[in-house]
Amino acid sequence: MPGLADAVASLQLVDHHVHGVTAHDLSRAELETMLTESDRPRPAGLTQFDSQVGFAVRRWCAPLLDLPPHADPDSYLARRLELGAAEVNRRLLRASGVDTYLVETGHRGAGFLDVSGMAECSGSAAREVVRIESVLEALLSGGADPAAVPTEFPRVLADASTGAVGLKSVVAYRHGFDFDPARPSDRDIVAAAAAAIEQFERTGRVRVDNPVLLRFGLWCGIDRGLPLQLHTGYGDPDLDLHRCDPLLLMPWLRLVESCGVDILLLHCYPYHRQGGYLAQVFPHVYFDVGLAINYTGVRSQAVIAESLELAPFGKILFSSDGWGPAELHYLGAELWRRGTAAVIAHWVDSGDWAIDDAVRVLRMIGRDNAIRVYGLDGR
């Protein structure tokens, strides 16, 4: 279907949730560690290249490094090191067809390209998304008076997100979505802040995982007024997956509905059908299947098809959630293009969709929805 294929190939994407690429050369062990959400050592004799994402790297990334499709892992790693990280990153990012990256900067920042670094390497625009918990942790570890936190943090968050296009919370990782949806009281915030500061003074580190502080951060994010991203569903073993079902958010979503802030549910897998339902019934809810696309590889077509079942097409966004190796940034775009085009082409072939509608929906999900939600018209 030439018209659809041309539209897919030429579409300049907005990757609305992404992290920086690694700036240094990666050993095989480092690369394999970054091609999985597991943080555990691999069993002896196994390789991450024997997975959907590993096969996708060898099929789609190898030709961009001047190797044949399906190059063996040793050849791929050798060529990667021969070219060097800067050239690998440049090739893969520029081949992705992304013209704007919304970069979340709270995840493993050291050794990763920052917002300006992503823009320079990719030749594309890049804007920042600020992680709420990181800003709160900086405040709590910086000598804050616990009694001042309820009034001080909103100001600090506003300063930290000046120029940002959105905020992000990892409440799903730190607690789960089964939290009390109400605003916490100042008294409870002060007590929780005091405990976190005492922990920092005792251990030298602070981690915002107290449900009171997490709720406080969420409500401050709502008050800030920027689009708010929430990690949802699949992730590393630091989370309890059964507590990351977005349906658990419904009491909180009802409370914040009148606040005028758009909520963006990231990844959602295996709860992407629940995400589609929430995007249908709540005007302020949007979703994507970003992280799942990379890790399901050739099966991502099925995930993409399921994400198109229920939600209005104006409520679905594209993201790669790429972080670390630039392969994940490239594959997020390539597999999304291939999977979405295959699904929609079938509907056009069957006569259920018109080709003009198909092209319009591709543009909506791939870029136009993100431009509207994040106010990127003037970028």
Image (spheres, rainbow, N blue to C red):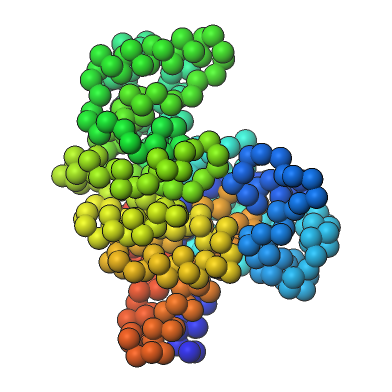
Quadrant placement of the C terminus: bottom left
Q: Is residue 41 above or below residue 98?
A: above
Q: Where does the image place residue 362, in percent across and percent down from the top left? A: 40, 73
Does the rendering let one see residue 359?
A: yes
Residue 279 vertical placement versus 161 (above, below)? below
Q: Report whether 350 appears left or right of 46.
A: left
Q: From this viewpoint, is residue 83 visible?
A: no
Residue at image coords 23%, 20%: 185
Which x, y percent locates residue 122?
59, 58
Figure quadrant of residue 61: bottom right
Res. 87 image quadrant = bottom right
Q: Position of residue 103 (x, y in %)?
A: 49, 48
Name the residue rendered at 80%, 65% in the picture.
72
Left or right: 171, with 278 as reference point: right
In the image, taking residue 71 as reference, residue 100 lies left or right, namely left
Total residue callouts: 0
> Camera-side residue: 244 or 153?
244
Residue at position x 77%, y 73% in the image? 68
Residue 191 position by quadrant: top left
Image location of residue 112, percent across then percent down: 62, 42
Q: Residue at x 31, y 11 (%)?
A: 147
